[in-house]
Amino acid sequence: MNAVRGFPAFPLQRAGARFATTWWGRSWIKALEDTSLDQTLLRKGRAYAKTGQVGPITVSPGRLAALTEDEYDTVVRVERLTAAQWDRFLDQVAAKAGHIAALLDGDMPHELVEAAEDAAVPLLPAVGDLEPECSCPDWGHPCPHAAALCYQASWLLDGDPFVLLLLRGRGREDLMRALQHHTRPAGRPPAAPPDDGHTLHAPRTPETAETAEPSEVAGGDGRGWGGAHGDGAVGPGPEGGVFAAQGFAEGFAAGVAPLPEPPSLDVTFTPLGLEPAPGVDVAALEVLAASAASRARAVLTAAALGAEPPVLSEYQDRVRLAAEHDLDLGLDAPVAAWRHAGADGLDALESAWTPPRHELARAWALLEAAWEGEEPPRAELSRNRWTIGGDRQLRYGRDGRWYPFTRRDGQWWPSGPPERDPAALLT
């Protein structure tokens, strides 16, 4: 079922606030402005958008709606993609694992949009694609209220590209479910996992195992099915157990039950709620179980999408545990960074690096543009860190986003989620 998303009304904006800081958000604005024949109405629309004249926004397939000036019903319609177009779009998403990873990270890859256009799937609107409707008496196309709604929608698109996909007909969960069941495009077989010498190979029956070389079975180390036996024997493992390879082979020969369907992506984790037991730290066990479930979900989600699961260092995993389960491990600043942006936020907190000069120049140009001809705040520049006024700092992350920090007791602390436009963190 298609989702409907509601967004609270945007508050009054301070001087220097910009519309559309992402390239896809700017494309949305361009479609609006290229369609309009009256720049005066657009100026009024920008003023309405910045001064709180647009109420809560509802986004649904093909429709953007809000109450404006507390009395006018304002709607902007966008053509939804057909089933055939969605199928071709899914082909393009599935063709490269990085595409869905980028969307989940709040990015809309140029390459994906271009590939979709080549497949006759228009994601971004063009001239005339935004159809405004409003109950106000203004005959403008669009009227100031519809223009204001479109300008504010650019902020929604900046924050989440799935808003655009919902307008085209499918929300995030619909798209993820469709991807899970989508057939991979022809000519792109699933990548085989690397063989590190400890990976179980394709299961064999006992009959085929008799003709296999010892190095071909189980661990690939020449020890055969029994592993530690060293003679290829199939027998009990240490302390009365059974070696994994043997159990796997016997289960295969006996006819194992088919695997269940992949779990839904929107299942909520239910804590174990263990009873106290002598000699057992129940609270720690519950945290470990919840952590294992979280990591398993990440691995399953990545596998369903054809992507690689995230690999964390021991330190990163300790910070993750503290952040997700409110553990007091003396990692307050790292935990705050993790809660804002995961491993990327932790890296922004703990490492300085030298970004390419053109990336910093582009960021400074965005900052200047946000002040619309006025002088932007004075900043002290050092590698990937800009310090403003002595108590605020922006750090450019290796993921291309800017991270805000504030000085507290002589130490820099993460103060919020990252943005791709540094001006959004200062206005």
Image (cartoon, rainbow, N blue to C red):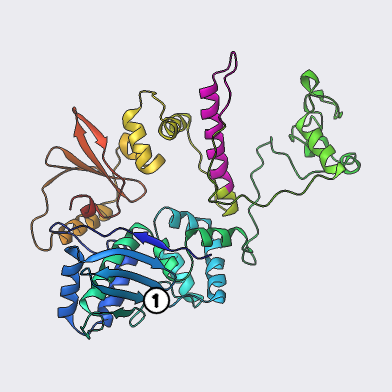
Residue 27 visible, this orientation = no
- 344 and 153: which one is in front? 153
Question: Any magenta on residue 286?
Answer: yes
Q: Which residue lies most toward the top here?
A: 279
Q: Where is 318 relative to 166, above or below?
A: above
The image shows residue 266 at horizontal and vertical percentages of 53, 51
- 161 and 290: which one is in front? 290
The image shows residue 171 at horizontal and vertical percentages of 47, 63
The image shows residue 215 at horizontal and vertical percentages of 78, 36
Q: Report the side of 64 relative to 421 (left or right).
A: right
Identify the residue at horizontal 18%, vertical 69% (top origin). 48
Identify the residue at horizontal 43%, vertical 72% (top origin). 123
- 307 and 14: which one is in front? 14
Which residues are drawn in magenta? 273-300
Q: Where is 422 relative to 316, above or below?
A: below
Total number of numbered labels? Answer: 1
Question: Any magenta on residue 417?
Answer: no
Q: Main secondary structure of the magenta part?
A: helix
Q: Report the side of 302 relative to 394 (left or right).
A: right
Q: Where is 305 relative to 198, above or below?
A: below
Identify the residue at horizontal 42%, vertical 61% (top origin). 162
Q: Report the side of 177 relative to 324 (left or right).
A: right
**Secondary element at tag 1:** loop
Identify residue type, mark 1. Val
